[in-house]
Image: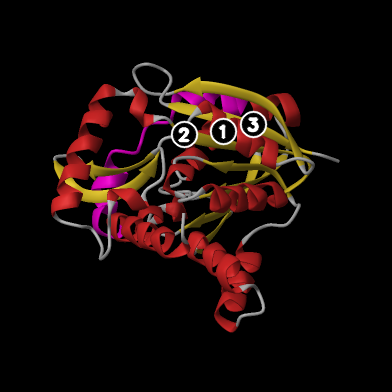
Amino acid sequence: MDNATAQNLIDLNTRFYAEHAASFSATRSAPWEGWRHVADIAREHFGDTPAALRVFDLACGNLRFERFLAEQLPHTSLHVTAIDNCPALAANMNELARVDYHSLDILTSLLAEDEYGSDDAIAGSRTSALNTAFPHASCDLAVCFGFMHHVPGAKLRQAVLSRLIDAVRPGGIVVVSFWQFMNDGRIARKSARSLDLALAQPPFAGFASSSLEEGDHLLGWQADDAAFRYCHHFSTAEIDQLAASASPLAAPIDTFSADGSNHSLNRYLVLQRNA
C-alpha cells in the first residue's frame, strides 16, 4: 500500500474515534473471552501472584484490559504504560493506579519515519515522541488488542509488532489480537453496505476500492453504515507471516481463537522475546 493511501486511512480512523468515542466506549465494558487465556499465560510465566508486573498496552482504549487484569491479579502491583490516539476513551483512567498514559498517533509517526527517514526534521521529532512513550526492554507483558486491524499495510504492521517486542525484556511476553470479522456474516454484510456507500460518498479525496488491499474493508458504526472506519480482516497465513517476521527477536509460543458468538472473532498470537 502506498503511504498516501495509508495516511488517509489512518486519518479516517482518527476522525471516527474522535467523533464516536462516547458511544464506542459505552459498548466496551465487558472483558473479552480471550483475555482469560491471556491472564493464564501471565500466571504461567510470571507466577500466580507476582509482587509486581510491568505492562505495556498499545491502543489501550478505555483501559478495560487493565481493569480486568487488576481483578485477575488482585495481589499484584501493576505498573502500566499505555498509548492511545483518542484521549477521550481513557477519560476514567484516574481510577486505576500506576498508569503512565501517552496520547500519541503512532501510525503517522511510523509512516513518516518510513517515508522520510529519522534524519528528517518532522519525522525525527515524531520518532523522538515514539521513543519517549514506548518502554524499552523493560516490561514483562506487552499487549495490543483491537488495533492491528486498523494498521494499513503489511510493512506498517511489522513495524508495530517490532515496537511491541522491543518494549518487553528478554523472556517477556507479547500478545496481539487479530480481528477476523469476516467470519461473522452480519459484519460481512455491513461491510458490503459501507463499501457501496463509500463509493457513492467517498470518505476522502481520491478514495477508490482499487486502492485497498486484499482483506481491507470499511465498516460503519451501529446503525450508521457511513460512519466509516478502516479495518483489515486477517487470514491465518498473514498472521503466520507476521509471526515469522518477528524472528530472531521473538518466537511464537501460542496461538488461539476466541471471542464473539462463534468464539473465533479474534485470533491471538503470543510471542516470547528471546534472551
Residue with the mark numbered 1:
239
Residue type pointed to by label 1: Ile
Considering every residue shown, the one lying at the far front of the view is 210
Q: Do the numbered discs 2 and 1 sit on residues whose CB atoms are within 8 Å? A: yes
Q: How many marks?
A: 3
Q: Which residues are magenta?
A: 18-40
- The foreground one among 240 and 271 is 240
Work out whether 245 lies above or below 153.
above
**Measuring 62% from the left and 35% from the top, which residue is drawn there?**
241
Q: Are marks 1 and 3 in contact (CB under 8 Å)?
A: no
Spatial CA span between label 2 and label 1:
7 Å
Mark 1 residue element: helix
Q: Residue at x 59, y 68 (%)?
A: 113
x, y percent for residue 263: 42, 18
Residue 23 counted in the magenta span = yes
Task: Check the image and report above or below for 57 versus 72.
Answer: below
In the image, is residue 135 part of the stretch drawn in magenta? no
Mark 2 neighbour density, 10 Å: few (under 14) some (14–19) many (20 or more): many
Q: Crowding near pointer 1: few (<14 within 10 Å), some, many (20+)? A: some
Label ID, residue 270: 3
58 left or right of 14? right
Name above or below for residue 256 compared with residue 84.
Answer: above
Above or below: residue 203 compared with residue 210: below
Give the residue displayed 61% in from the left and 39% down from the top.
242
Mark 1 or mark 3, which has the lower sequence index? 1
The Cα atoms of the two marked residues, 3 and 2, are separated by 16 Å
The amino acid sitting under disc 3 is Val
Q: Label 2 belongs to which residue?
A: 234
In the rendered image, the residue lying farthest to the bottom is: 121
